[in-house]
Image: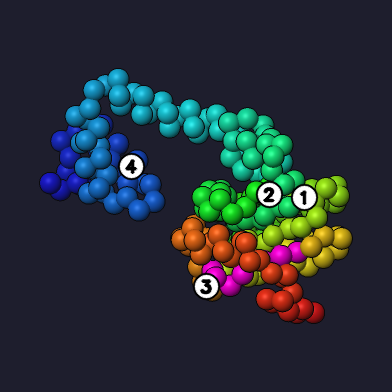
Amino acid sequence: MDTHSLPSKLLDTAVGELASLPGIGRKTALRLALHLLKQPAEQVNYFGNAIIAMRNEVKQCRVCCNISDSDTCEICANPNRESSTICVVENVQDVMSIEATLQYNGLYHVLGGVISPMDGISPGDLNIASLLERVAAGDAKEAIIAISTTMEGETTAYYLYKKLSAYPIKISALARGVEFGNELEHTDEITLGRSIKNRTPFENLFGHKG
C-alpha cells in the first residue's frame, strides 16, 4: 500500500506521528498503526496514556539530572551507594548501560549531551555548573569521566578535566576497553564493566595539553 494515499486522514496523521520517531520510516509506522487498530480500544488507550504520563510526569533528579519519578532518583536516594564517587556521563542511556554491568556502586551526573560547536552546544548548555557545585560541596573524592570516545566526547572530557582539576578530587577515565569513536550505550556490558573497574587517572590517558 502506498503510505502517501491512505484511506483515512486519522490513520495518516497517526502514521505521520509514528514516523517522526527515530529509526521509524513510514512503512514501519503504517504497520504499527494498523497493528494498534486491531487491538482492543482499552489496550490502545492504556498505551497512549502511558506515553502521555511519561512525558508529563517524569522528572529530572535534582541531584544528578537522571530521569526519575520523584525529585530525587532512586540511585541518589540509596544510602548503600558510594556517595564519594561520581560517574559523569553524557546521557540517561549511559546510566542504564553502566548500571547493567553491576560493576559500579557510586553516584552519577548526567551532562545532557556533549560540547559540540557544530551543533551549537556549548558548555553552558550542559549540566556542568551543577556538577562543579556537587564537587565543591566536598563530599566527592573521585570523578569518573565516562563519556563516549567520539571527537565531541573527547573535547568534553578534557574540558571537564580542566574544570575539575581546580578541586582536590581524583579524576579518572574509563580504561581503553572502549574504543575511540564508540558510544557507551553501544558498548557490550562486559567491556564497559571492565573499563569502569580498571579505570585509570585521566592524565595517564590524555596527558596534559597545556
Tell me how far mark 1 sits from mark 3, CA to CA.
Answer: 28 Å
Tell me how far mark 4 sits from mark 3, CA to CA.
Answer: 34 Å
Of badges 4 and 1, the one in the foreground is 1
**Chief SS of the magenta region:** loop
Q: Three-letter amino acid code at disc 2?
A: Gly
Q: Three-letter amino acid code at disc 1?
A: Ser
Tell me how far mark 2 sits from mark 4, CA to CA.
Answer: 37 Å
142 over 149 or under it: above or below: above
Q: Is residue 160 left or right of residue 100?
A: right
Of badges 2 and 4, the one in the foreground is 2
Q: Three-letter amino acid code at disc 4?
A: Leu
Give residue 162's quadrant in the image: bottom right
| Residue at the image position 67 percent from the left and 62 percent from the top | 145
Query: Mark 1 and 2 residues: CB-CB less than 8 Å, in contact?
Result: yes
Q: Nearer the viewer, residue 196 or 10?
A: 196
Furthest-top residue in this view: 42
Q: What is the crowding at mark 4: few (fewer than 14 residues within 10 Å), some, or many (at least 20)? A: some
| Stretch of the chain drawn in magenta | 171-178
| Residue at the image position 73 percent from the left and 70 percent from the top | 201
